[in-house]
Image: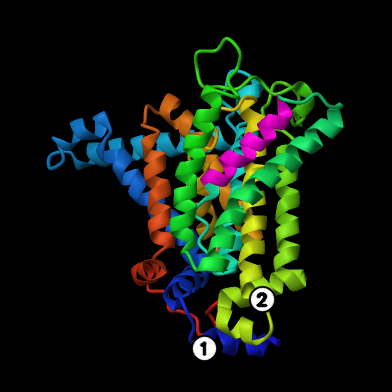
Amino acid sequence: MSGVDVKEAAKAPGPEREGRRIVREIMSGSAVVSVLAVVVALVIGGLLIAFTDVRVTAASGYFFGRPGDFFSAAWEAVSQAYGALWRGATYDPTARNWLGQLGIFETLTFATPLILSGLAVTLAFRAGLFNIGAKGQIIMGAVFAGAVGFGMDLPPVIHLLAVIIAGAVGGAIWGGIAGALKAKTGAHEVIVTIMLNYIAASLVLYLLKNQLKAPGSTNPISPPMHDSALFPLLLGPNFRLHAGFILAVLAVLAVAWLLNRSTLGFEFRAIGANPSAAQTAGMLVSRGYILVMLISGALSGLAGVAQLSGTSKSLDADIAGSIGFDAITVALLGRSTPWGTFFAALLFGAFKAGGTSMAVNANVSIDIVLVVQSLIVLFIAAPPLIRAMFRIKTAKTEGARA
């Protein structure tokens, strides 16, 4: 099936056209629109910082008499907040010791599970599926990895490899369930994956209160992972950055090759463009749905391994946190490309690393960072809004990337 055939196939009618149309519209946004979406979100976040600052509120009473004081206080509040955010995420020369100066490594640590789970969502997007179940897949990947990590005694290198494989298998099983239901019964993957998220969250809580509970602990938490099952620290004990980041980079390379250089990746993209046309061309659409969700789930499972063997060291009910839903934002911001997802994950890792610095050093609520992230989602999901704001014309060549 040639490239021209794929473009023509994308125009053909087929089932679930509306869902694929939304995916194509999101994926068709240019890089300029994505950057402007982040800028607009930061501007609105700056306005929120200014109007909630005590100094700005006090100066507003003298706005008509001394407007300069108001604007000066607003600028000072916003610049201090975003300055602290930047320094906390990259480099802070004002820190008391050199360990506190290198916030970039915290950014990479936070970005590691986001890269892996973002790739999971990206891969499903390219096949025309909405994988909203990254959270459940992360949890199950962590459960499987934990069962091997603190439940078995193996030689050091073999133990870590077994943990990685177990985590990938756990996530793949959870993703494969959604893929199989989609392929065999036509069940919508959004509903299925959301329900699987709830099941995984309840299941891990049950296991932590019973089979996986640490001896003598009153809290639902597992025993610590064996040292042989942990990712080695890349920069020594003073930094949290671990070898899971290398695994994430390798996953980006693998997904990029899969989508752009392999026959299977071509099938995924053709199915995402139009499953009816792909079926006519001899591709097994149902097999494609199952395979893409298996691989997507495995990537999310690796994110669970990164959390468990790299950061938390023990399994708890909040092992996934907000990573599963942040992954959707990362995939959208990255325009559903592997390297775009990588850099979007770095941005969100910077938000997480710098948000704490902003709260501590600028006395700004860390919830402002969450507002900015939510605004990015809003603007990324509505490219026409950004184009209208900046009077950007849609390029004629812009269309479905699948």
Front residue of 168 and 48: 168
Category of crowding for the residue at label 1, using alpha-carbon neighbours closer than 10 angstroms: few (below 14), some (14–19), many (at least 20): few
Is residue 341 on the magenta stretch? no
Asked if one can make out residue 345 in the rendered structure from this viewpoint, the answer is yes
Q: Which residue is mark 1?
A: 12
Point out the residue furthest to the top here. 216
Rendering quarter of residue 58? top left
**Magenta: predominant secondary structure element?**
helix
The residue to which callout 2 is attached is 284
Which residue is at 76% across, 22% downward?
227
Q: Provide residue 264's location: percent of width, then percent of height.
A: 73, 70
Q: Which residues are magenta?
A: 135-150
Residue 7 as seen in the image, left or right of residue 244:
left
Viewer-side residue, 252 vs 191: 191
Whole-percent x, y for residue 374 in the image: 39, 49
Instruction: Say what secondary structure mark 2 lies in.
Output: loop
Question: Residue at (74%, 44%) from the top-left corner?
Answer: 247
Is residue 351 among the parts visible in the rendering? no
SS under mark 1? loop
* Scheme of colours in the image: rainbow
